[in-house]
Image: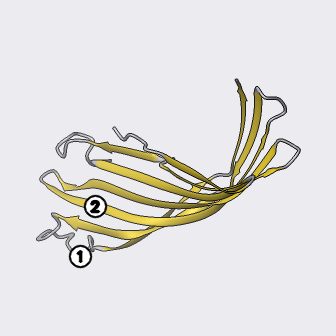
Amino acid sequence: FFPPPNLHVGVPILDGLHLGVGVTFPYGLGIAWPEDWEGRLDLVSQNLQTINTNPNVAFRIPGFDLSVALGAQIYYATVTLDQVFGLRDDVEVGAQLGGDGLGVGVTAALMYKPTRELTIGLNYRSGTTIDFTGSVHFDGEEGTAFESTFVDQDISTSLSIPNAFTLGIGYQ
C-alpha cells in the first residue's frame, strides 16, 4: 500500500500574477512476494516510485476571466527489482537491480470562467523520458561453474512518459 501524498502551494506576487509549486507522486508500483514462492524465478519484488515537482507561474488576463499558466515538470524516479535465477534444482542465484533517473518536461494551462458558476480548464503536460542508471548485484553464484557469468555491473534503462491533455469542467 503506497499512499500518494501531494502538496500544492500558490502565492500571489502581483495583482493577477501567482507563483506556485506542486509536488506529486503520479506513477508508482510495488509488489513483494515471499523469497520461497513458486514464481520467484520470474519475480521476487519490484518497486517504482516517481516524484514530479512542478514549479509554475500563472497570470490572470484582466477583463477576460481567463488565466494562463506555464511551468516545468521535474521528475525524479527510483526503480528496484529482485529476481532469482535457477541454475540447477539445488542452486539459485539472486539478482538485485536498482537505479534512479531524472526527466524534465513542460506544462501549460488555460482556465476560463464564463460565468460565476462555471469554470473550464485545459492542461497540457509534455512527454518526457526518464533515463535510469544504476547497478545489478548477484549473490549465490560463488563456487559454481557460472561464477564468472554473474558479474556485478552497471545497468541502464528508460521510462517514457507520454504527452497528456486534460480538460476539466467545474460547476458550483
Q: Residues within 10 Å of mark 1 (few under 14, many from 20)?
A: few
Amino acid at the residue labelled 2: Gln
* The one of 90 and 37 positioned closer to us in this rendering: 37
Q: Is residue 4 left or right of residue 45?
A: right
The quadrant the C terminus occupies is top right
The quadrant the N terminus occupies is top left
Query: Is residue 134 positioned above or below 127 on the image?
Result: below
- The answer to whether residue 107 is visible is no
> Residue 39: which numbered mark, if any?
none
Query: Is residue 47 positioned above or below 143 on the image?
Result: above
User: What's the residue at 36%, 45% (across, down)?
Assistant: 30
> Residue 96: which numbered mark, if any?
2
* The one of 24 and 146 positioned closer to us in this rendering: 24
**Figure disc tally:** 2
Amino acid at the residue labelled 1: Ser
Give the residue pinned by disc 1. 148
User: What's the residue at 78%, 47% (across, down)?
Assistant: 67
